[in-house]
Image: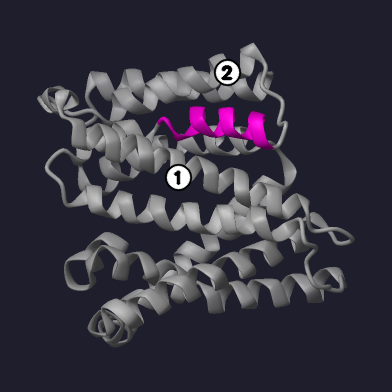
Amino acid sequence: MQRSLTAKLGTWGATNIRFLFGFPFSLVFLTAVLLATGDHLSWPSAAFWPWLLLGALSQIIGTGLMLLAMTDRSFVVTTAYLKTEAIQTAIFAFIFLGDPLSVAKLVAILIATIGVVITALRPGGEKSFAELRPTVTGLVAAAAFALSAVGFRGAIIAVDGVSFVTAASTTLVWGLFVQTAILTVYLLARAPDILRGILSLWRPSMLAGFVGAFASQFWFLAFALTAAANVRTLALIEVLFAQGVSYYSFKQPVSLREICGIGLIVAGVALLIAV
């Protein structure tokens, strides 16, 4: 949905779609959670804000680089490098949060990551691996998303005195608020015409915002319950779902290479669950 709006709104305009139109839905989610749990909110502690800013700013950078890569001819290779996010998340979470990182878990993450990279590649795409631009774009975007996962998990953990559901929902609201404020002020100062374009495309933007906020709600719930690396690695199973949708809805054949890649993903995820 964001990609379809990039041509009209530019990279940062399309990036802001997810945050600007996702924020109202996050408020609805938080309201429903508070009514269901009976939790009472208080002002977040000082420890909350550095983690939140790390998560919010890193996600902006990662999303912008990802959308930028979608317009590049080496997008497939960039996507392959993007899939190193799980490994980078494990390393950053171990360093900054002290999340456990055993050898078995690292092997599981590595197996799943290799599977995703194999699935993402296309015939002839290996030629672009020698180019610097897709390599740097993919690795930096992956690092940004990894730091974002670590930052948001750190923020959720810093919310005390409420259920994990409320902690996750509160962090999502503040995260989207910060991201919306930063990008909206930037566009207002540098490209007000793009901001007007965003508002004129409110119908498709609203749908993209809802899907983004809905997905983020469950991302944050998962971050509240387990290590960031576990969440990002388990999420690689989305490749299996994507292949299924492509096959049954668009009649796209599945190659032997893709089957091998999916097999490695499933094996890696299964090993992670086991350990």
* Occupied quadrant, residue 196: bottom left
* Secondary structure of the residue carrying numbered label 1: helix
**Residue 274 horizontal/vertical position (percent):** 67, 19
Q: Residue at x 39, y 20 (%)?
A: 114
| Residue interval drawn in magenta | 84-96
Left or right: residue 119 versus residue 169 is left
Tell me, yes or no, whether the highlighted magenta stretch contains residue 91: yes
Identified at 15% across, 46% down, the residue is: 72
Write down the residue under mark 1: 144
| Mark before the other along the chain sequence, 1 or 2 | 2
Amino acid of disc 1: Ala
Residue 106's tag is 2
Real-space CA distance between mark 1 and mark 2, rounded to the nearest whole angstrom: 20 Å
The C terminus - image quarter: top right
Asked if residue 109 lies left or right of residue 184, the reply is right
Circle 2 residues within 10 Å: few <14, some 14–19, many ≥20: some
The secondary structure that dominates the magenta segment is helix
Q: Is residue 88 above or below residue 56?
A: above
Question: Which of 199 and 31 lies nearest the eye of the viewer?
Answer: 199
